[in-house]
């Protein structure tokens, strides 16, 4: 769902577990959010960006893939 965030995670060797630990939540919570079951709250997105990807824009990291079906 968040292809840019996933790409940056791969480039920087950041795991779901790393993000979960930084936010103080379970691995499953971050996995669900990355898969679109739940949304990231602004404060979570900001913390992820500030800790792991300070050179990336928030809008870029959390851009959601658009449904292209008619």
Image: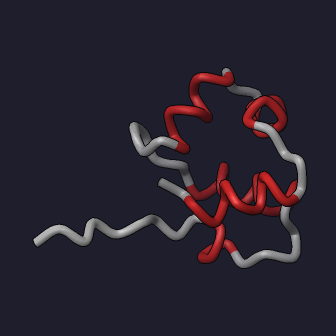
Residue at (80% x, 38% y) in the render: 15
Is any part of residue 21 visible from this angle? yes
Residue 14 picture location, percent across and down: 85, 46
Residue positioned 63% across, 76% down in the render: 60
Q: How many marks?
A: 0
Q: Is residue 33 left or right of residue 48?
A: left
Residue 46 location, quadrant: bottom right
Relative to the observer, which residue lies in front, 48 or 34?
34
Viewport quadrant of the C terminus: bottom left
**Left or right: 51 in relation to 35:** right
Where residue 2 sits, quadrant-wise, is bottom right
**Percent of width and height locating residue 25:** 69, 26
Residue 49's place in the image compared with 63, above or below, is above
Q: Is residue 31 above or below residue 62?
A: above
Any part of residue 51 in sight: no
Give the residue at x 60% y 76%.
59
Image location of residue 68, percent across then percent down: 25, 72
**Residue drawn at point x = 67 percent, y = 24 percent:** 27
Q: Nearer the viewer, residue 19 or 13?
A: 13
């Amino acid at each position: 769902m968040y292809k840019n965030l996933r790409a940056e995670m791969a480039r920087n060797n950041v795991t779901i577990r790393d993000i979960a630990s930084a936010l103080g939540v379970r691995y499953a919570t971050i996995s669900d959010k990355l898969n679109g079951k739940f949304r990231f709250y602004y404060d979570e997105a900001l913390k992820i960006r500030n800790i792991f990807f300070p050179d990336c824009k928030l809008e870029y990291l959390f851009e959601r893939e658009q449904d292209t079906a008619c």
